[in-house]
Amino acid sequence: MAKKQFKSESKRLLDLMINSIYTNKDIFLREIISNASDAIDKLFYISLTDERVGMSREDFRIRIFADKDKRTITVSDNGVGMTAEDMEKNLGVIAHSGSLQFKQDNAEAAGNEIDIIGQFGVGFYSAFMVSDDVTVVSRAYGSDKGFCWHSTGADGYTVTECDKDAVGTDVVMHIKPDAEGEHYSDYLENWKLRELIKKYSDYVRWPIVMDVEETKPVEKTDESTGETKTEYVTETAEQTINTMVPIWQRSKSDVSEADCVAYYKEQFHDVTDPVAVVRVSAEGAVSYKAMLFIPETVPYDFYSREYEAGLRLYSNGVLIMDKCADLLPECFRFVRGVVDSPDLSLNISRELLQHDRQIKVIAANLEKKIRSELMKLLENSPEKYRAFFKNYGTQLKYGMVANFGMKKDMLRDLILFYSSMGSDAITLKEYAAAMPESQSVIYYAAAGSMSSAAALPQTEEVRSRGLHILYLTEPVDEFVIEILGEYDGKKFCNVASDDLGLETEEEKAETTQKEDENRPLLDFVKQTLGDRVVSVRLSHRLKSFPACLATEGEITLEMEKYFRTMPGAEDAPMAKRVLELNGEHRAFDALKKAYDSDRDRAAAIAKILYSQALLAAGLPLEDNAEYTELVCSML
């Protein structure tokens, strides 16, 4: 029979399909198996109303066989098969999907009962990524003739009549010879084929069978000596490779928590149990099933650029994407698991999504489920949640400040901070519950650690009145507080820079009067320190410390420290520093006395007080040698 040209496109189109549409050669087997599964689906659907099919559900299967000598892989199914006309439509016309046509033709009668994987009719041509010659032998249900479709690629194809004993289709792919950087021969190995089946087609609903060699011990007795020896015999037997029914598709009553945990450990290579398992079965505008896991341990590369977040995405049990990042918000990127939906709009290669409406719907629902599960963990197992938060709390905090705080309301009750209330981290809700009715703000102090925050001079005033303080110990913490603005109607107050609101009007008047009395001295200290500070004032928040640093404006000292760790630190924004002096401290008395009698000594004392304030704030001295010399000069 004369060779025919592909009807819908030229060599360029087929080259595009083979070389551009598909980015991973391994998926060729997925596509051929999916087509075989669709063919079985069609015949099974027919069998429900046509007794002449003579096959039950248990009779259907997909068989795969590799012949190393001939360099061929054969994928056989006992599905509906194809006539010569079907071959012309489905294989001779690129991008015509017989499966999609079947679903459309039977949609009214079947409702949503037909789950067809193939939609575009180009998956078959992925075989040419690894093959230089493809033969399809098929016999359609209801026909006594078989037909053979043959092609070596874009130069065309032939369709001829041939013998075939049973209904179904055989796809025979002749594998390309190895080339530089391309080891096509691997696809002829049974281990490789099993690996591809388990990865991409493990949950195809029909059995995928192969001949598998197994070495088994056999006990044999030597008749002459009576001794029993163990010999190893290699046997070949047909085995079903795929699982068929995924664990997430089975009802909750059929799958225990232990089963889910075992699946997680096996699939995601974790030796520890997840802190929570989330199962979802949703029906509606978008139907899907999901099984999610919240890990206990942090992957070694989690906070690196190499880490790839995302859930495994399936459509009707066929793996579409190994890691679909769009299914998870950035704040929950640590979650692992799978999502399976028959309603996805797939693109032509089934590798990416044609449009993301369905994904957005699923992602929004999963976000709510994950938050709900974390809240449940926090309320019912606080110790377990604290252990989880120790590992992933930073991720949640950065999730709050990302995109201008878009997720702040969703995450705020999941965030923990250390505090003066005890050694355990607490929620904002717990802090608010412990506040006396008279307290109008939420106090916080930022430093590199809990102990450093507690030791800040500015905390003395708050603690002396029996009030609690949140200790912000991570660089992101102040940004979290800034993006929240308030909690439960209570604004946040930085003990190091904001007005604490604890002074009475009388106390404020006394502080103002004392500042006015000491204005020449305060101006002298400002002049001595120059532009290292924007102002010098008397403090109403210090008790035992002689001096401390406060700030003006939005940039705090902890923010300044954080910006210094970023690339381009030389241009990082600086905090506007304010030196606060304790007017009741003996160091201030020494400063006053020196100001009246020895201005050089007064300048030295001013510099020492500023340096001590730097140290108390956890900031480096600007000149270590100068500070040492100044201290020694006071001895």
Image (tube, rainbow, N blue to C red):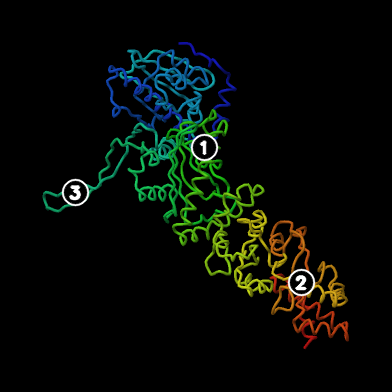
Residue of label 1: 182
Cα separation between marks 2 and 1: 80 Å
Q: Amino acid at mark 2?
A: Lys
Residue of label 3: 219
Q: Amino acid at mark 3?
A: Glu
- Residue 461 in the image: state x and y as whole percent: 67, 73
Tell me what residue is drawn at x 74 percent, y 79 percent. Answer: 546
> Counting other residues with Cα less than 10 Å from the Cα at mark 3, is it few (<14), some (14-19), or many (20 or more)?
few
Q: Is residue 304 left or right of residue 540?
A: left
Point out which mark residue 508 bears: 2
Q: Look at the numbered discs 3 and 1 and tell me whether their residues touch, using CB distance below 8 Å.
A: no
- Residue 122 in the image: state x and y as whole percent: 51, 25
Q: Closer to the observer: label 2 or label 1?
A: 2
Is 354 rendered above or below residue 332?
above
Tell me what residue is drawn at x 28 percent, y 37 percent. Answer: 237
The mark that comes first in sequence, 3 or 2, is 3
Residue furthest top in the image: 1
> Counting other residues with Cα less than 10 Å from the Cα at mark 2, is it few (<14), some (14-19), or many (20 or more)?
few
Mark 2: secondary structure = helix
- Residue 187 in the image: state x and y as whole percent: 44, 35
